[in-house]
Image (tube, grey):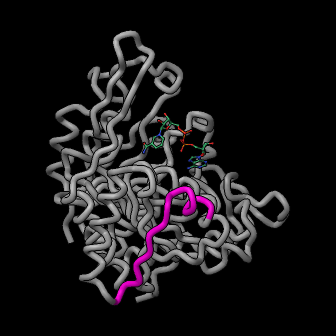
């Protein structure tokens, strides 16, 4: 198979972990005789430094011409500490999602049994959890009108949804539920928000087309509580942009760390694959970031965009086997276990690539 893959490392640990997402793709190409060609482009703070804007035309053009994009993360402390800055890294990410029509963000919460003790939640609560989040990505307060009054003392962000935006992601989520345990939980705040009432109405209507899927509606505040109380109750979770952003960060603790969760953003064109974490300035440049989320994002690319299931499973198995042998980055190292071997970003990346090679059956 021949594919063109665009790598956008971005900022902070995005640059450190994406190296390893790309490395596993290269290794898989060698093992399975695929031809993957790679190009690279700037986004976020890295692009602002050179071009003065977070998403240069050249990056967007390269993204449009690629078959898939592996992204790292954007962000820099400078912008977090000064909200008045008008040109900001996250504008680049929002724009590329909109321009590429990436309306559905899939976030699988995969729990490796080896990491049951790495979470702050009890193993008996976590065991058996398998959730697939569908977070809407091109609507909500992220894209609604923003306003600040002339005196600077009042601000608003419009939470806006159109029927078609809800319908298209809900349909994808229902289809995914049909292929899983046939349960869909739609999360909203319909007791307070008009946009959520539209959300619920659309999902209720669509549910009639999927009678084999058990559909449930939950308010977001309750969902936040249920996720840590009894995560096993969820199969597919469908939710809006803002709620999905927050709930999936919470759900990352089920998997042990933000450094373990990958995501796939899909829509009309090439897919966009990225860890759910940000640029993590607190640990950037120290060789301690966990590269597994980027590596699993590469596996999602192979599975979802290229239909290469065997290749994706090989990556998943290589990660499992490395964890089974006791290798950990610091974020997933259980302090009470003395048999674990704590590695840096590069060492963890290297050992996963090595396992990939070793796991290929002879002949
Ligand atoms: P973050 O996800 O960068 O970090 C949150 C916490 O998780 C930090 O303590 C960090 O050290 C830890 N963490 C994250 N990824 C990790 C990894 N791979 N290995 C080990 N630990 C990891 O979120 P934040 O601190 O709120 O934001 C930092 C910057 O990232 C901000 O500028 C923010 O705007 C940006 N951000 C970008 C994205 C994105 O690019 N998609 C998403 C979220 C935040």
Q: Which residues are magenta?
A: 212-225
Residue at image coords 45%, 77%: 314
Q: Residue furthest top?
A: 151
Q: Quadrant of residue 55?
A: top left
Foreground: 59 or 184? 184
Q: Is residue 126 visible?
A: yes
Left or right: 111 as drawn, with respect to 90: right
Q: Is residue 320 above or below residue 35?
A: below
Q: Is residue 26 visible?
A: no
Residue at image coords 37%, 76%: 311
Residue at image coords 39%, 38%: 10
Query: Residue 184 appears at what percent x and percent y?
Result: 41, 76
Left or right: 322 as drawn, with respect to 240: right
Foreground: 302 or 197? 197
Query: Residue 261 appears at what percent x and percent y?
Result: 51, 60
Magenta-span inclusion, residue 221 = yes
């Amino acid at each position: 198979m021949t594919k063109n893959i665009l790598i956008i490392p971005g900022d902070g640990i995005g640059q450190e972990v994406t190296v390893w997402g790309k490395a596993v793709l290269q290794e898989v190409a060698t093992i399975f005789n695929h031809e993957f060609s790679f190009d690279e482009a700037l986004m976020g703070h890295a692009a602002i430094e050179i071009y003065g804007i977070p998403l240069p035309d050249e990056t967007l053009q390269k993204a449009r011409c690629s078959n898939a994009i592996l992204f790292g993360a954007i962000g820099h402390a400078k912008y977090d500490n000064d909200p008045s800055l008008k040109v900001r890294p996250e504008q680049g990410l929002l724009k590329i999602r909109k321009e590429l029509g990436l309306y559905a963000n899939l976030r699988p919460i995969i729990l490796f049994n080896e990491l049951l003790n790495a979470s702050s939640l009890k193993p008996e609560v976590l065991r058996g959890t398998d959730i697939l989040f569908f977070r809407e990505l091109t609507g909500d307060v992220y894209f609604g009108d923003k306003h600040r009054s002339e005196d600077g003392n009042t601000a608003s962000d419009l939470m806006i949804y159109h029927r078609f935006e809800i319908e298209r992601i809900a349909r994808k989520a229902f289809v995914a539920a049909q292929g899983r345990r046939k349960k869909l939980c739609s999360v909203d705040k319909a007791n307070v928000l008009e946009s959520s009432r539209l959300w619920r109405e659309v999902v209720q209507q669509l549910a009639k087309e999927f009678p084999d899927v058990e559909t449930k509606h939950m308010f977001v505040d309750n969902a936040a509580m249920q996720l840590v109380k009894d995560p096993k109750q969820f199969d597919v979770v469908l939710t809006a942009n803002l709620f999905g952003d927050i709930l999936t960060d919470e759900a990352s603790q089920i998997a042990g760390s933000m450094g373990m969760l990958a995501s796939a953003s899909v829509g009309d064109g090439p897919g966009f694959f990225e860890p759910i974490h940000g640029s993590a300035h607190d640990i950037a440049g120290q060789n301690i970031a966990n590269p597994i989320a980027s590596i699993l994002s590469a596996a999602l690319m192979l599975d979802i965009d290229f239909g290469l299931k065997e290749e994706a499973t090989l990556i998943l198995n290589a990660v499992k086997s490395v964890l089974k042998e006791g290798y950990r980055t610091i974020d997933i190292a259980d302090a009470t276990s003395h048999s674990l071997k704590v590695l840096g970003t590069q060492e963890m990346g290297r050992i996963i690539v090595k396992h990939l090679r070793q796991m290929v059956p002879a002949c």
